[in-house]
Amino acid sequence: MSNAPEPKNNILLFLALGLTIFVVMNYFAPKPPKQQPAETGKQNQPSATNASVAAPPTEANNKTANMVATADLANSVESVTITTEMFKAVFSSRDGALNFYQLQNQYRTTDHTEENRLVLLDKAVCGSNLVFESIETMGATTLQLLGANYELVAYPENAKISGVKGKAPAVTAGNELVFRTIKGEWEVTKTYTFDDKTPYGFALSIGIRNLTQDAKNIRYRLCGINGLIPDENEGRWSAPVGVVAALPSPESTDAAVEHTTLTDLNENANTPFETKDDPRANIAWLGMTNRFFATVLLVDDPATTGKAILREHMITQEEAPEAYQPEFKVYPDSADVSLVSSQRLKVEPGQTLTQSFRFYGGPLQETSIAFDPRLSDITSYTVSWFAPISRLLLKALIFIADIVGNYGVALILLTILVKTLLHPLTRKALTSGQRMQKIQPLIKQLREKYKNDQARLQQETMRIWRENGVSPVGGCLPMLIQMPIFFALYGAFSRGFEFRQAMFIPGWIEDLSQQEKFVDLGINIPVMGQYLNLLPILYLGLQILQMHMQPKSDDPQMQQQQKMMKFMPIFFVLIFYAMPAGLVMYFAISSIYTLVETWLIRRAIDREHGTESVVATASTKKNSGKSK
């Protein structure tokens, strides 16, 4: 710290803050993936999990079901590819499902080549998405639609189709991709609409038509998102997480969305589980997120939902396609998230029940998810108390970066701005510290004089502090104010999409959201990992220099505290070492600013208040003598 030695509660404060940082960084970070054996075949298709929704048919039953479904269909296709400026999506007649989803403007690494474009969903890894699995009629058996073939009714003129079997489908001038299947008493039509509401995603409408002469009360099951490919192969924040967001009631505002994750539903965190029900109704959206991206299905009418089902499974490195093996070596766990409707959905004879959804697959970026207020809290920057500060600092960094064109430069300017705003408090703390140092001989005399009268000692000490303008906690105030800023910046750099692959200095800091990785050591060293990072070492050197600038104390107790404080920089460096380069850079720049600021303030204090402090001390000694 930059101020002079202070009372003994300072060391306790430092230790408490260090412990707080350690707990927050570990407790609020996503839990590491549970290493459990993968069960062959389970990652390739969704599964029903509760008694009221029948289990998926066997492979033999699936073949029969497909034959029945195909009997009234004009065609089937292997794939329909829709390519926009922002994404490429591949659909199939098999389940009329989304099998592949790739972002056109995002990349796995800083090597921005076409083959390195970021894939979020791939059937080859986890299975199909947006699969209409089953219809359960009240009082009757459940009709399984999992694995059904769908007829391609129409597709946009800019789409590419392949593997057509049967009658050629119609090309439409609009922006709709339509699949249809007939099975038993039901006709199901899936309509994907590629509109401009969000550049990342599309609308989905599912029509359920009753082909009988009787009204039916039904509920259905829809597998929303089946797996999410990690976008990194290291780092503690990137593990995919299944999430369900529900409203407390149908009348609730969008701001009242409550999130539940796979971990929340697991009653025993040490026991791996495969399926769990989230019994809440009024589901606003469900899906999966990782550090910077999300694939979610938003429900237009949450009142029609009954519950959600989350299923966790494992994908070993060997089972994943070669392109994704580095990611799945670190994050072998995945999940699928299914929606079950309420039991009050009534379909009249010959009528169609229409359920509307919207798929979003894109970055966790404020501007990208602004189209639906229910997604406003999908990104958890840090503990809830500091989240607003994280968003504020993130907006400030984005604003400055838009002007200067570099997030590293923007961070330097923001650091200077924050430290400048804190300057009055820092000056007050240093002034108090200087005065505290000068009255130490008098405090020592009081301790000798009132060593058997603690109440009188405290009374006299407080009087001396008051007369000399000393605050016992003044030096701690700037540090306490900076703690929310620390946690807020940690959240911003850990979760802020804008910092993903944001370069500062080529060849050194090429991604502010990752540790700098200056040199690959080729071996894994405890705490350090396999990389040499310069910023934490620079920060350590600055902290040691800052401590050498502290005034020396003659008080044995203060000397002991100063010796203990020498170990604090090492403790913080161990915490910071693998943190995002942007966060460590903030503290290194802040330390440089503090060194210069401390030197200038102390020079000014010595010139302006040196004589005054001596006079005040002499006056105090005189008053103290009269009180004997």
Image (cartoon, grey):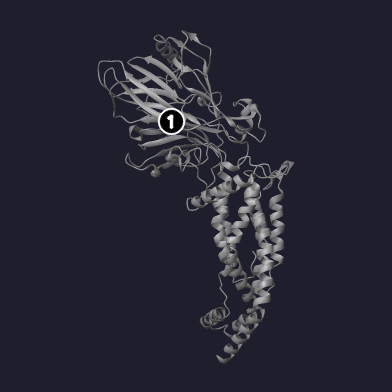
Of residues 7 and 206, the one nearer the viewer is 206
What residue do we see at 68% from left, 42% from top? Answer: 510
Q: Position of residue 69 (x, y in %)?
A: 40, 13
Left or right? Give the position of 76 relative to 549.
Answer: left
Q: Quadrant of the C terminus?
A: bottom right
Query: Residue 614 falls in which quadrant of the image?
Result: bottom right
Q: Is residue 437 visible?
A: yes
Above or below: residue 606 compared with residue 125: below
Left or right? Give the position of 228 relative to 145.
Answer: right
Above or below: residue 568 compared with residue 329: below
Of residues 378 and 18, the one nearer the viewer is 378
Left or right? Give the position of 505 relative to 224.
Answer: right
Left or right? Give the position of 302 relative to 269.
Answer: left
Q: Position of residue 406 (x, y in %)?
A: 64, 45
Residue at image mark 1: 358
Q: Residue furthest front?
A: 403
Of residues 25 and 95, the one nearer the viewer is 95
Above or below: residue 25 compared with residue 314: below
Q: Is residue 274 visible?
A: no
Q: Residue furthest top?
A: 166
Mark 1: amino acid: Arg
Q: Position of residue 116 (x, y in %)?
A: 64, 29
Above or below: residue 569 compared with residue 46: below
Few, some or many residues within 10 Å of mark 1 (<14, 14–19, 20+):
many
What residue do we see at 52% from left, 17% from top? Answer: 79
Counting the numbered discs, the total is 1
Q: Secondary structure at mark 1?
A: strand
Q: Quadrant of the N terminus?
A: bottom right
Q: Position of residue 248 (x, y in %)?
A: 35, 42
